[in-house]
Image: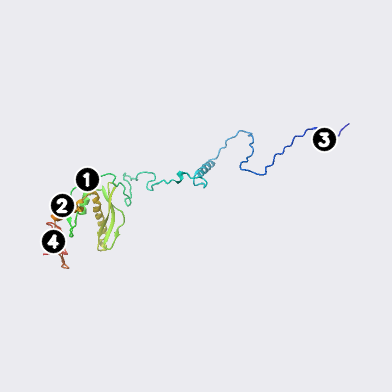
Amino acid sequence: MILSRRAAIAATRALTPRARCIIPPTRFYATSTATAPAQPSQSPATPSKSSPAASTASKTNSAYKSSPSASKNTPLTEADVRYEAKTIARPDGSQPSVDVAGIPVINWANSFHGISSKPVTEAQFKVLMAPLAIEDIEVKPDGVIYLPEIKYRRKLNEAFGPMGWGMIPKGEAVVGKAIVTREYALIVDGRFVSQAQGENSYFSPDQLPSSIEGCKSNAMMRCCKDLGIASELWDPLFIKWFKKTHMEQAWVEHTPTKKKKTFWFKKGEVEVSYPYTLSK
């Protein structure tokens, strides 16, 4: 019996065992932990070379993520909340800048650099604390004793040398109706010593420049108290002794008004000038 070609193919299929068809289960949901099955590597992994720009971007992103302020979810540490004091003057802890001569550049208008850092030498101490010469002391008509400002300057020059000291204004001059004041600081050997308010009177606008200059001399005399110069002039015991032994009073007359009053003088130096005359 001869079979047709179509019948032969159908018989062959019927005798061949069929492979089992397994249908994988269908996943109808997704989870954050679900991952795709790993596929076997067909070739060894080759490290990829990143570009410089990509490397820089990667570092920037890494640094940004590590910053506490980069993410609100990053927990703060003790280092993030601890306050660390920093000076605005010298944040790097360096010393004051110096000029070409090695001299510190300091804004003395608001600085107290070097105050009480070290005492004067023994030789300077003897010069500053030397007793006043009686002939150097002057007397005002109201009985106040004083040392002329040039004597203070000479004492400072003797102790520290010319250009070894200076007076620095700590503010602008304040002009009143009949008085001018200005604050100055005494600087010695590049160190702050003392500061004081200088004052001077004036009676007409053309006297104002001289009065402002007088504030400097007055402040210098007051600053010198901290160095011990002419300290006797503030000692009540010395003042009483000097008045008793080296001063005398005399009657004077104001020539235009004919009013009389008493003036103080050093003994043996009773002398007046216009508009006053000695009263008989």
Disc 3, SS = helix
The CA distance from mark 2 to mark 3 is 150 Å
The numbered mark, 2 or 1, whose residue comes first in the sequence reads 1
- Residue 183, image quadrant: bottom left
The numbered mark, 2 or 4, whose residue comes first in the sequence reads 2
Q: Pointer 2: what residue?
A: 134
- Residue 125, image quadrant: top left
Say which amino acid is labelled 3. Answer: Ala
Q: Which mark is residue 10?
A: 3
Residue 245: give x, y in percent of width and height. 13, 54
The CA distance from mark 1 to mark 3 is 133 Å
CB under 8 Å between discs 2 and 4: no
- Locate residue 45 relative to residue 83 in the image: left or right: right
Residue at the extreme left: 280
The numbered mark, 3 or 4, whose residue comes first in the sequence reads 3
CB under 8 Å between discs 4 and 1: no
Say which amino acid is labelled 2. Answer: Ile
Disc 1, SS = helix
Q: Nearer the viewer, residue 104 or 34?
A: 34
Q: Nearer the viewer, residue 272 or 54?
A: 272
Residue at the extreme right: 1
Q: Pointer 1: what residue?
A: 125
Q: Nearer the viewer, residue 179 or 248?
A: 248
Q: Pointer 4: what residue?
A: 250
